[in-house]
Image (cartoon, coloured by chain):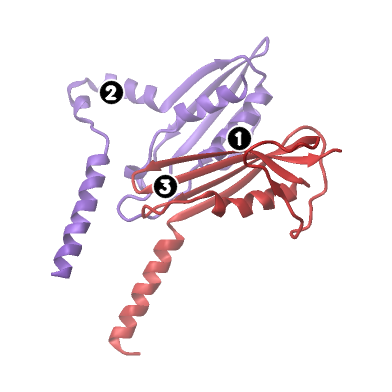
Chain colours: A purple, B red
Amino acid sequence: MKPRILTHSVLLLLASFTLALPVTAKAKDQPAEEQAAEKDKKNTTTMVLAAKPDAVHAAALQALASIGCEIKKDAPDAIEAKRPNKVGLAVGSGGEKLFVTIKDLGEGKTELKVITKKTMLGIVGQKLWNLEVAKQISDAVK
Amino acid sequence: MTPSSNRVAALLGLAVLLLTGCSTLQPVGFPVGDKRYPPKPPTAGVQVFLAAPPARKFEPVARLNVHIEKTFFLPSAFAEARPKLEDLARQYGADAIIQVEEKKSRLNETFIYNVTATAVIFTD
């Protein structure tokens, strides 16, 4: 009796993960070019901030730390970071790469671009962080 | 070793491997201002002000961040992050931690816990 209860519990758990996966049925009706453009929009956030590039850079480092990123490359105009992979019961998490570019527009303005790239290993447990990171940076330099 | 004890050892090994690879704890500090203070010894006390800032005069020396992620639906709490925050504060020569802000979220089976704080040095 006990093994049956265990099997049912595992099946229920796996079913809950399946329900949590994003729905992509809508994308089937769209042309390939539109799908690519939409994907680009989703994983990229660009904004112009009324702050100096060094302030944006400092805020970016803190925002990336707050989502558990490890900094791989750090230059005044570009940061590359990665969230470490974690083993899980079904999907785990982590593995996303984040790219931040900082462009000085002059007159105290800076263009910020944040890109998330999902990686093959553990892609089901990954998410797009660009919007959240960009918003945090924007709030920090206000 | 009997076959059954071999099996138990293998299962234990697998469990240890999974549990060590299922969580991350990332403490990071960011200096504030141009002044740098010498680090404090590991046994030095660090006061934690959770509700209100201290009545004494203080100066911020660093922003602290501790990020914990655990899979297998395991939650995290401030008690787990506190020693790391205190360690970070000591590295910046701080006397206390203020403005503690916690964030909790979930990504599938992963529980995400993030806490930020300001490390300060008393100036009076």
- Category of crowding for the residue at label 2, using alpha-carbon neighbours closer than 10 angstroms: few (below 14), some (14–19), many (at least 20): some
Residue A14: give x, y in percent of width and height. Answer: 23, 51
Q: Amino acid at mark 3?
A: Phe
Q: Is residue A51 above or below residue A134?
A: above
A3 lies left or right of B84 = left
**Residue at image point 46% right, 62% down:** B20
Quadrant location, the N terminus of chain B: bottom left
- Tell me residue B122's x, y (percent): 81, 40
Extreme residue in the bottom direction? B1
Q: Nearer the viewer, residue A123 or B65?
A: B65
Circle 1 Cα neighbour tier, 10 Å, few/some/many (<14 / 14–19 / ≥20) = many
Alpha carbon of mark 1 to alpha carbon of mark 2: how far? 31 Å
The answer to whether mark 1 and mark 2 are in CB contact below 8 A is: no
Q: Residue at x 42, y 56 (%)?
A: B22
Give the quarter of the image for residue B18.
bottom left
Determine whether the residue tagged by mark 2 lies in a helix, strand or loop. helix
**Residue with the mark numbered 1:** A61
Would residue A34 appear left or right of A97 to someone viewing this image? Answer: left
Say which residue label 3 marks. B111
Classify mark 3: helix, strand or loop: strand
- Residue A88 in the image: x percent, y percent? 36, 54
Chain holding disc 3: B
Q: Amino acid at mark 2?
A: Gln
